[in-house]
Amino acid sequence: MSAPTASGRRSEQDVETPAEPLAAVRPWTIAVGFGLVAVVVCAAGSWIPSLWGDEATTLLSAQRPVGSLLEMLTHVDAVHGLYYLLMHGWIRLAGDSAFALRFPSAVAVGLTVAGMTLLAGRRGGPTAAVVAGVVGCVLPRLSYAGEEARSFALTAAAAVWLTLLLVWLVDGRGRTVQAGVRRACWALYGVGLALTSVLFLYFSTLALAHLALLVATRTPRRTVRTWAVAAGAAIVSLLPLAVLAFLERSQIGYLGSEPSDPFGALYTPWFSTPWIAVVAWALIGLACGSAVRTWRRAGRGPLPFATTWVALAWLVVPTGAMLLLNLLYPMWTARYSTFAAPAAALLVADGLLVLGRAAAGRWRLPVLAATGAAVVAFVAVCTPTYLLQRGPYAKNDSDWAEVSAAMGAHAQPGDAVVFDEATKPSQRPRLAMHTYPDGFASVADVTLRTPYTRSHGWADTAYSVPTAAALGRFDGVRRVWLVENDIDGALSSYGRADLEAIGFEETGLTVQTHRTLLIELTR
């Protein structure tokens, strides 16, 4: 061991590294263990938040007959078509409760965390694998994606395992396997990149990160050419979907009207809140600083396939490419970078390891104890956000479960319901009837025009109240429940005057939920 410095303290580089305390634990044991923990962490309480607009899109699309779904995809949501087909099969096995809809995402985060431990442990050893596993379980973007019925958690899992496969082929035992096996693995890489990009088109930008990594590490040209064939074939196969997505681009036109937050890209994609982001970016800075020092000491040659460099390319390049495109045409929102969240977690984990070694050198603590304390502190920082994610209104402030319960408690057979249609589609209270149908079992949807199963879009279309009245939809109806979207007290009063014009009057009974108002009218 090196002698202490003049100050009596040992530098980070001088700290003696003890024998790896987890050396006897096999990598796959850690991977399976933390994968299961991540599934439990994400699934716990996942049924509590009300489903929200994007999840309603998933549910309604998955419930459609396959023929109707395929027709819908030629008009909207082509970029999510594969996910909807997968969920179409899943809900027939598991049902369509909030827990059932979200459980595949919890499993996907489990696979994500398992792959992360293997990536972190390949050079860092079991301790690095364990730290990466813990961070993966609590990183806000992953814990959020793991309780949401969208494809983002699946893209995170695919990104981990495709990156792990690439590293194995280029810098692992994959270099020495038989030529036929290598070709099969490169084909698997290409197919995986293509299929996951069909699942979510922007995932294709991961290929840019992998290319940057191959260039920075000065991978042999023959290997780069092989990668280019696999990745190129995957990208070419996506051209029909890309054309269809371009034709359907009006779906994300609303992104251009969202308020600009220049600092949002620093915390919303992976860390959820500014205070978690401050801690996380400080740890990422420690990890990158340590990696740069190691690289300089090695002679500033090609970058190694160390976890830090792999994760840094993965974190920065795809999101950077999407943000640059976003300057030309609004097409990015924070959740689209979920597939880079495992990279953020790996960098945070590296930072915790560096911090643990530094603290051990400064205060003469065992490295394992110092690292463990740092990990516990990071978990504590993330815990309040995790708990908020499991609140009843955690998903875009949605309260549809509460609306359904209130309707079920007050409505009687023969009553009609009129929904506020003036709000944006993802917030329309009509979706409460589809996501939580039990409370609406006794009421008639008198303004329904075209059910979603026969619509070119993903949602129902509705008549106005006067048109529905002219069609006789209100004949024999004595009581109507008007369900108004109430955001910050800003009622739209949709349909109230029209109902009064055909003889309905308010009784004075209103039921207020978190952001919705149910108004009773009779005649």
Image: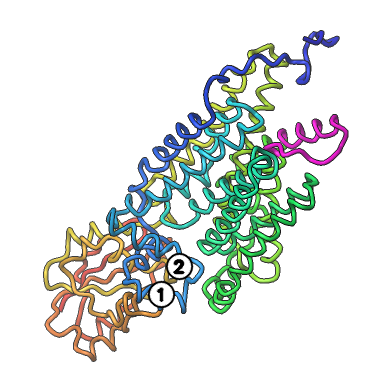
Q: Residue at x 36, y 79 (%)?
A: 455
Q: Which residue is mark 2?
A: 81
The answer to which quarter of the image holds residue 515 is bottom left
Three-letter amino acid code at the position of disc 2: Gly
Q: Is residue 318 magenta?
A: no
Task: Give residue 149's position: percent from left, percent from top.
Answer: 41, 56
* Magenta stretch: helix, strand or loop mostly: helix
Residue segment shown in magenta? 286-308
In primary-sequence order, the first of circles 1 and 2 is 1
| Relative vertical location of residue 519 with respect to residue 286 in this rendering, above or below | below
Q: Is residue 296 above or below residue 142?
A: above
Q: Residue at x 71, y 59 (%)?
A: 228
What residue sits 79% from the left and 40% below the top? 303
The residue pinned by badge 1 equals 70
Going by the numbered disc 1, the residue's amino acid type is Leu
Q: Are marks 1 and 2 in contact (CB under 8 Å)?
A: yes
Residue toward you, 64 or 402: 64
Colour approach in the figure: rainbow
SS label for mark 1: helix
Q: Position of residue 39 (x, y in %)?
A: 41, 40
> Toward the viewer: 295 or 379?
295
| Left or right: 414, with 197 as reference point | left
Q: Nearer the viewer, residue 295 or 12?
A: 295
Left or right: 79 as drawn, with respect to 278: left
